[in-house]
Image (cartoon, grey):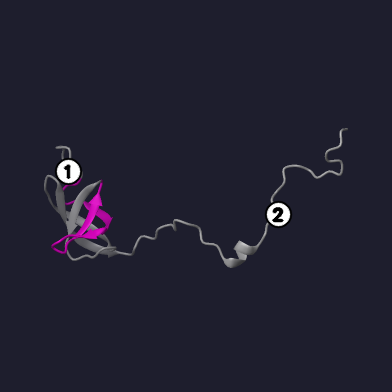
């Protein structure tokens, strides 16, 4: 951090997603860019935690409750084979006319 106070305080609660596991087996999550170590979780878990200890650069938290995984929007839209092969007439902003190209 830049020498300022940590963005979390002991006793605060947050919902986090575990993004990695540290060398000692604790889960790692971030809150406002601040690293938290959380025992008893694995990568991919979504949990509600309570901050138990705050140091200058990292914090520690305990799991209060396991949450359902947060459902993310897919990065790319999924379409069916039928939608892929179906041809749609493009909407025309012009009227068709019989005298195309003729000078009036």
- Seen at 14% across and 37% down, the residue is 3
Where is residue 97, by image quadrant?
top right
Instruction: Say if the magenta span includes residue 63.
Output: no
Give the magenta part as a residue range: 8-32
Give residue 22's position: percent from left, percent from top.
17, 60
Q: Which residue is mark 1?
A: 6
Q: Residue at x 72, y 43 (%)?
A: 93
Viewer can see residue 24: yes
Q: Earlier in the sequence, mark 2 or mark 1?
A: 1
Identify the residue at horizontal 65%, vertical 62% (top origin). Answer: 86
Residue at the (72%, 46%) spot, across then down? 92
Magenta span contains residue 30: yes
On the image, the x and y values in percent for residue 82 come to 61, 66
Q: Is residue 49 above or below residue 58?
A: below
Q: Which residue was labeled with disc 2?
A: 89
Determine whether the residue tagged by mark 1 lies in a helix, strand or loop. loop
């Amino acid at each position: 951090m830049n020498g300022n106070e940590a963005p979390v305080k002991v006793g605060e609660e947050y919902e986090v997603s575990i993004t990695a596991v540290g060398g000692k087996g604790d889960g790692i999550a971030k809150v406002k860019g601040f690293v938290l170590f959380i025992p008893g979780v694995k990568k991919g878990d979504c949990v509600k935690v309570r901050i138990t200890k705050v140091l200058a650069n990292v914090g520690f938290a305990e799991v209060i409750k396991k949450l359902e995984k947060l459902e993310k929007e897919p990065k790319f839209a999924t379409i069916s084979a039928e939608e892929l092969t179906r041809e749609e007439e493009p909407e025309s902003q012009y009227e068709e006319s019989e005298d195309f190209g003729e000078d009036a």
